[in-house]
Amino acid sequence: MPNGSPWLAGRQLDELESQLFPQPQRTLLEANQAVHELLLKAQVDVNEATGEADLVLKRIDFRHPERNRFHAINQFRVATPGCVREFIVSDIVLFANGMPLAVVECKKESATCANPMQEAIVQLQRYMRRRP
């Protein structure tokens, strides 16, 4: 709601969140497309608080970006149960309204890193294989 007050029941919020994560049995591209569609527009059958039907929820307000909350977290740690390492640590994760949207790996050329761009790509590919 424009005044910032909650307008969905907690159960409805949980249900909307479960639609986003995880995206089982989909390729990374398919999962990204599905999540993108849900970010742009999700449907709620009935607002349990007001009784309104067929509400559209936009998780990111593109018309009024100032209404969104953005965060960039460095050294963001993600648990990876069942993997060799217990967790991965991304250099930077970008969030919009509490949802992780992008992972940034920062590499610089050094004696042990001749091609920083390639090293970052390899690191991100390792993260994809370890996602919970």
Image: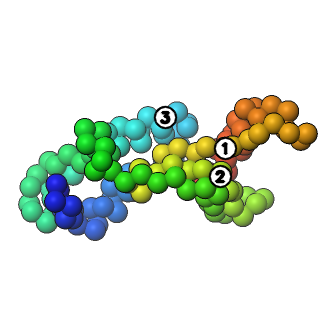
Residue at the disc numbered 3: 30
**Neighbour class for label 2 at 10 Å: few (<14), some, many (≥20)?**
some
Tell me the residue at 24%/48% (across/down).
Answer: 57
Image location (x, y in percent) of residue 37: 35, 37
Q: Quadrant of the N terminus?
A: bottom left
Label whose residue precedes the other's in the sequence (3 or 2): 3
From this view, report whether residue 4 is shown above or below residue 72. Answer: below
Tell me the residue at 53%/44% (across/down).
Answer: 102
Please identify the residue farthest to the bottom as the structure is shown: 10
Question: In this orientation, which residue lies closer to the viewer: 122 or 30?
Answer: 122
Left or right of residue 34, residue 121 in this image: right
Give amino acid for label 1: Glu
What's the CA distance linking mark 3 and mark 1?
23 Å
Image location (x, y in percent) of residue 19: 38, 51
Left or right of residue 38, residue 80 in this image: right
Q: Quadrant of the C terminus?
A: bottom right
Residue at the disc numbered 2: 90
What's the CA distance linking mark 1 and mark 2?
6 Å
- Which of the numbered marks, if any, corresponds to residue 105? 1
Give amino acid for label 2: Ser
Total of numbered circles in the picture? Answer: 3
Q: Residue 106, can we see it?
A: yes
Mark in the foreground, 3 or 2? 2
